Amino acid sequence: YAPATGVLVFMMQPSGNDWKLQFRVTKDFWYYVDHIQPLPALKLGAIVKAGDVLGHTNRGGGMDLGAFDYSVNHDGFVNPKRYSIPSLHYVTPWKYFVEPLRSQLYAKQRRHPAAEPDARIDFGIAGRLVGDWFQESVPNSSEAMGPVGWPKSLAFVYDYYDPNKVRVVIGGTIAPPGVWTIPDDAPRPRDVSVASGKVAYRLVYTETTQFQYGLMLVQLLADDRLKVQVFVGSQARDAEFDGGAQVYLR
């Protein structure tokens, strides 16, 4: 069902019968639904009203709902050129619903009771390790948010359920794709700067943190330049960079 009245301004079918639909509600506010099979009559320029049926999901599948507002800006994207408009101006869609639906939706989300109800995706701090990084071959543009950048991305962020837990997200290239965490006594990415020199992180599994996946070495060569290497399978606590190290940029 359409969550709000709007005009269908974008349709994309990445593969199969799975579509992404984007709607404009006001000059600033937009929302999208993804991973649905739209009704055949739904065409670009169509005006849908709140509650109208848009289509259905694939059997056993789920649907994404996102929103962005041009009047909302965030300071955690260190290099805005890397990101698309929806990312730069993202908002949590739940808070725009009317009551009692708003409270019902918030009650269903998986979020630590002590955490702020609205999650975030912008964690970057200029001159610190925390946030997003891209292998130096990735163009300095929003292409980083597409297939060109995905396998060459690296992020030091925080868990969607418990924002106190660090998550190291590897898109590929330096190691197989995956999400890991670091021991509680390891330096927090927000505190790591050029002055920290080389830092060795034991990458451990997010659920069974007593098992080590490998060892990651990071070193900020400049505020926007990161040297990084991952030794998959290593159980060591420290090592030195070798010829396998790569450079990532903001």
Image (tube, grey):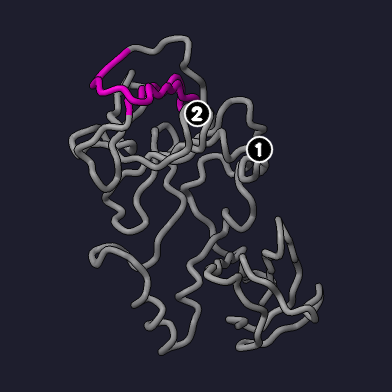
In the image, the segment drawn in magenta is: 214-239
Quarter holding the N terminus? bottom right
The answer to which quarter of the image holds residue 189 is: top left
The answer to which of marks 1 and 2 sits earlier in the sequence is: 1
> Would residue 68 be seen by someone viewing this image from the given angle?
yes
Q: Is residue 217 magenta?
A: yes
The residue that label 1 is drawn on is 148
**Label drawn at residue 120:** none
Q: Position of residue 54 (x, y in %)?
A: 67, 80
Q: Residues within 10 Å of mark 2 (few under 14, many from 20)?
A: some
Front residue of this view, candidates 160 and 80: 160
Q: What residue did someone put label 2 on?
A: 224
Main structural element of the magenta stretch: helix, strand or loop? strand
Is any part of residue 32 visible from this angle? no
Magenta segment: does it hold 35?
A: no
Q: Nearer the viewer, residue 22 or 29?
A: 22
Dot 1 falls on a residue whose secondary structure is loop
Which residue is at a point 68% across and 72% down the rendered structure image? 37
Q: Quadrant of residue 178?
A: top left
- Amino acid tagged 2: Asp
